[in-house]
Amino acid sequence: MRIDKYLWCTRYYKTRNMATEACKKGHVRINGKAVKPSREVYKLDEIVVRKNQINYELNVLDVPPGRVGAKLVDIYRKDTTPKEAFQNTELLRLSKNHYREKGLGRPTKKERRDIDHYLDESE
């Protein structure tokens, strides 16, 4: 089975076109090598998919006959993604909440107090 079809069948991408684009952009690797969408997938292949700033690592256990239900996905692949990858994404999301865009004007009174409090702690 083609890698783009496999990723679509195992529900890593919502459409097959999205899976094909990810392969073309180099977000999909099989056994450490970037692949084209037409690359065949075999049992025991190690796939790394870069999606939403997370490197999903999975091992192919079997090739599905077609798109499978969410409950049956684990029959065809084993997800070996480390937990740290998800924790780093959570930290990135939290840091964006405290980031102030340039050009939004003067800080509010509350933001000014927070800045003063932060500067007092560092001294």
Image (tube, rainbow, N blue to C red):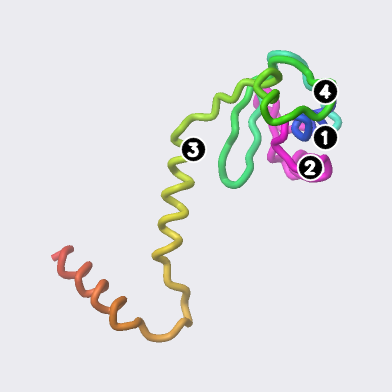
Which amino acid type is shown beneath numbered disc 2?
A: Lys
Does the stretch in magenta take in 113?
A: no
Q: Nearer the viewer, mark 3 or mark 2?
A: 3
Image quadrant where one finds the N terminus = top right
- As drawn, 59 above or below 86: above
Confirm or deny contact between disc 2 and disc 4 (CB under 8 A).
Answer: no
- As drawn, 69 above or below 95: above
* Residue at which label 1 appears: 37
Confirm or deny contact between disc 1 and disc 2 (CB under 8 A).
Answer: yes
Q: CA distance from mark 3 to mark 4?
A: 27 Å
Mark 3 crowd level (few <14, some 14–19, many ≥20, 10 Å Cα):
few
Q: Between disc 3 and disc 2, whose residue precedes?
A: 2
Give the residue at x 69% y 15%: 61
Mark 2 crowd level (few <14, some 14–19, many ≥20, 10 Å Cα):
some
* Residue at which label 4 appears: 40
* Residue at which label 2 appears: 24
Give residue 118's quadrant in the image: bottom left
Asked if residue 49 lies left or right of residue 106, the reply is right
Q: What is the x, y in percent for residue 119?
A: 20, 69
Specify start and end residues of the magenta stretch as a single range. Answer: 10-36
Q: Nearer the viewer, mark 3 or mark 1?
A: 3
Asked if residue 54 lies left or right of residue 106, the reply is right
